[in-house]
Amino acid sequence: MLELRKDIFADERDDNLNEIGKGTQRQDMLGHVTGTSTYFNDHKLQGMLHLKVLRSPHAHARIRRVDTVEAERSPGVRRIIRGTDVPRNLNTLLSLINFGKDDEPALAVDKVRYKGEPVVAVVADSHREAFEAIAKIRVDYEPLPTVFDVEEALKPGAPVVNETYPKNTFTYHDIYDHQKLRFGDVERAFASADHVLEQRYQMSPIEHAPTETNGSIAAPDTNGRYVVYTSTQALFFSLDTCAKILDVPSNTFHFIGGTVGGGFGGKVDTLTEPLSILGAMLTGRPVRYIFGREEEMQFGPPRGAERIYLKDAMMRDGRIVARKVRAYFDSGAYTRLSSYAVVKCAAHLPGPYTIPNVYGDIYCVFTNRTPATAMRGFGVTAMDFAIECQMDKLAHLIAMDPMEFRILNAYRDGDMKAHRREAKNTALIECVQVAAEKSKWKLREEFKRMSSLKDGGGERALIPLAATSSPMPALARATAQQRTAYDRAPQPAAGPAPLQPAAPPAPSPPPAPAPQPASHGAVRFSSVFGRRR
């Protein structure tokens, strides 16, 4: 049941809602429930051929020789397609907006860089004839060393996965091998903190597993044009990518989308359309290319694996005074969209919490795994998971209620973010308060009275001097390693000290002339994102 909390931000509310809370029927609902919705694979064209692909059994290997003679003589085969048949056999999706270099072939030519990479395509009269022809293709591979771990891939002497990026890291602005964030003086904050907690978080790749696998049908049209029925989530990205790979004007194609049988980000990459169109160009007949379930699982891009190291400095009363983040995104063998995920991740640090000193290094790393892509908030989702686990552990470390711990450290309107932007329309405090109310989680009165509209700005809107990048010095205090169950921490036996976010603690004497250590009551900021409505 929808509940409108009119007591929150009453001066900014607009209750003239057109859709929210009303029973408006989706336009495509009737087709779904009656089974009449049209998917790309519902188009059965006269004389349609079928394209299937021979994929690499190796995660990394040099291609010495490809023999397709017997396959070409196989019954029903209309065309064998090699990498040399692709007009521009190198691409990456975001190069369309001048972000990154072309690094992925439509069909491998000299090397394969992950298990399942496409090597040869066969166009035949039927699925069975295409598969039978594929079984007759002989490829001589020279296996090469592999690397599957992001940190191993960055070590000197690691196998070079993708020669476009010989250091196994994506290059930003033609100079930088990672995304970097610096705000305040993290080293000084760690040295003066009462608690330091460092933890490692690991997320595995996740397969989207759509009910409908990736696929497309391309058919010759009049005037040298081609009609393409596709399940893509990014119709114009796919159209422009095909025009680039096939080296023709974009108005050569008429792309027709429609109902997508599950995508979740996994149908953003242009995986089938270039080859189905090329097959239609080379044969003059409609060509259908659809993944089998095994292909979808092996070649269809997953959400990429992520490894995150979080190191937090905290005072006894629960104020987080510094956060250091080091994260690695496993892009797999090619870039796809992982480079963008890293940008999103860096823009989201340090989460929606008031931390006056932040240090972040985020890497996009190439390994011999299936290339990763978008999936439901990729770049932010895993980092949020790691941050919230860390918040629970920090609260447990000082025996503080985890809800109150979040309210204490949440940003307020007017605070300065680590990205040098003012926080506006913040509402984490109110969200936690309502969640506690609904779940009957008891909060102390001072936390019930706190608001995102109060205690922000002022000195907390200032931008501190950021320490220059340098190796992390030995800390004055040992790092506390803490494992905890995610249950409510017990309240301290002694009465708590007043927890007023605006009150700064007494600063420790600095060891040398330097900017004063930032504290909870000095400079406040939050993540780049966050809106009240």
Image (cartoon, rainbow, N blue to C red):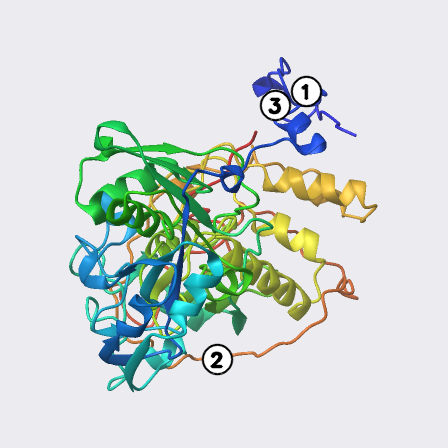
Assign a secondary structure to mark 3.
loop
Q: Is residue 224 visible?
A: yes
User: What residue appears at the point 27 percent right and 54 percent down from the top-left corner?
Assistant: 92
> How packed is label 3: few (under 14 Cα within 10 Å), some, or many (20 or more)?
few
Q: Is residue 188 visible?
A: no
Which sits in the foreground, 252 or 12? 252
Which sits in the foreground, 423 or 372? 372
Q: Which residue is mark 3?
A: 27
- Residue 172 as seen in the image, left or right of residue 474: left
Q: Position of residue 418 (x, y in %)?
A: 38, 50
3D distance between C-alphas at marks 2 and 1: 59 Å
Residue 262 appears in which quarter of the rendering?
top right
Residue 158 appears in which quarter of the rendering?
bottom left
Sequence-wise, which precedes: disc 2 or disc 1? Answer: 1
Q: Position of residue 383 (x, y in %)?
A: 50, 58
Assign a secondary structure to mark 1.
loop
Q: Are marks 2 and 3 in contact (CB under 8 Å)?
A: no
Q: Which residue is mark 2?
A: 477
- Residue 529 as seen in the image, left or right of residue 360: right
Q: Position of residue 163 (x, y in %)?
A: 20, 71
> How packed is label 2: few (under 14 Cα within 10 Å), some, or many (20 or more)?
few
Residue 64 appears in which quarter of the rendering?
bottom left
Q: Compared with residue 244, is residue 226 higher up or lower down, i.e. above or below? A: above
Q: Compared with residue 366, is residue 246 higher up or lower down, i.e. above or below? A: above
Sequence-wise, which precedes: disc 2 or disc 3? Answer: 3
Q: Amino acid at mark 1?
A: Thr
- Residue 183 as seen in the image, left or right of residue 91: right
Q: Amino acid at mark 3?
A: Gln
3D distance between C-alphas at marks 2 and 3: 61 Å
Total tally of numbered discs in the picture? 3
Q: Which residue is mark 1?
A: 24
3D distance between C-alphas at marks 1 and 3: 9 Å
